[in-house]
Image: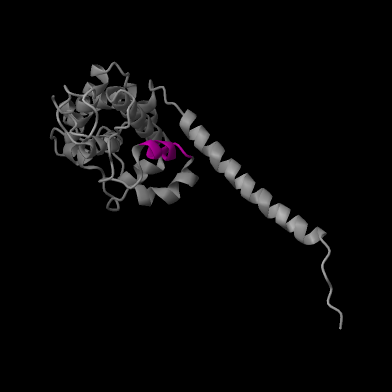
Amino acid sequence: MRRSALTMPTPPSFSLFLVPKRPAFTWGSMVHDCCLATNALTGDTFEEHLRSRTNRIVYAQMIRECLAAFSVAAQRGTWVPDNGGSCAIPLSVLELLLCLPTPLFAPLSWIIFRSAPGAGSPAQADLHARRKTHAAWALEELLGVGKKYDVKMAAVGRVHELLLAAVQEKNGAPCIPPADILRGIDANFDSTTQLLRVIFLSMAAVLGVFLVGIVINVALPRDVPTF
């Protein structure tokens, strides 16, 4: 019986047999590196790129679409792309954190992404050098998974389209405003909203316990030592 195309220890019914053979960490790196393509389009440094919540929203939506496509391909099983070689935070958690307000995301950004100060992505360097870029090929491969399993990937498709146009124009990084990239993409914030709700409820619970402790400490009578 033929092994899974992703060479993972999954049942023979695993349906990715027509997808080029790549291990989970290769697919995970391709999904994780979607931000390299968006950075090539905006033309800013990678640090500036991640400080923009609009950029992070586009990136998070690309991750969601890719995970949805792989979930269908894996027949809703436990197989997921592994980005452990790129980041210690799994993709399913990363997409939640990306949409957080910038003040909440900023302390985490240096842990999630590390880049040389003032540097852009390799894909951006490719555009400046008038070269084709690996990022466009990676997005095409991810779109192929979505097409095969009938999963809409509007964000990945839009970034891929803009990146191909930039490669063909050979004018360097096009410096497209993040809002223009986001236009036409129906970003879903449900998962991040749920995360924020959990964070705030947890903070409220901790604060409540702290206040109850103060009230008890003040209200209960104390034994006063006599001399």
Magenta span has 93? Answer: yes
Does residue 59 show up magenta in the picture?
no
Measured as percent of width and height from the top left, residue 204 is found at 63, 45
Q: Nearer the viewer, residue 96 or 71?
A: 71
Q: Which residue occupies the extreme top position in the image? A: 150
Residue in view at x 65 percent, y 50 percent: 207
Q: Is residue 223 above or below residue 85?
A: below
Q: Quadrant of the N terminus?
A: top left
Q: Is residue 156 above or below residue 201?
A: above
* Above or below, 98 relative to 5: below
Q: Residue, x 16% and y 26% (percent of image)?
A: 168
| Residue 219 position within the rendered picture, expressed as x and y whole percent measured from the top left | 82, 58
Q: At x 32% / y 28%, what residue is drawn? A: 77
Q: Along the line of sight, which residue is nearer the eye, 113 or 4? A: 4
Q: Residue at x 22, y 34 (%)?
A: 9
| Residue farthest to the bottom, as pictured | 227
- Place residue 51 in its image quadrant: top left
Q: Which residues are magenta?
A: 92-100
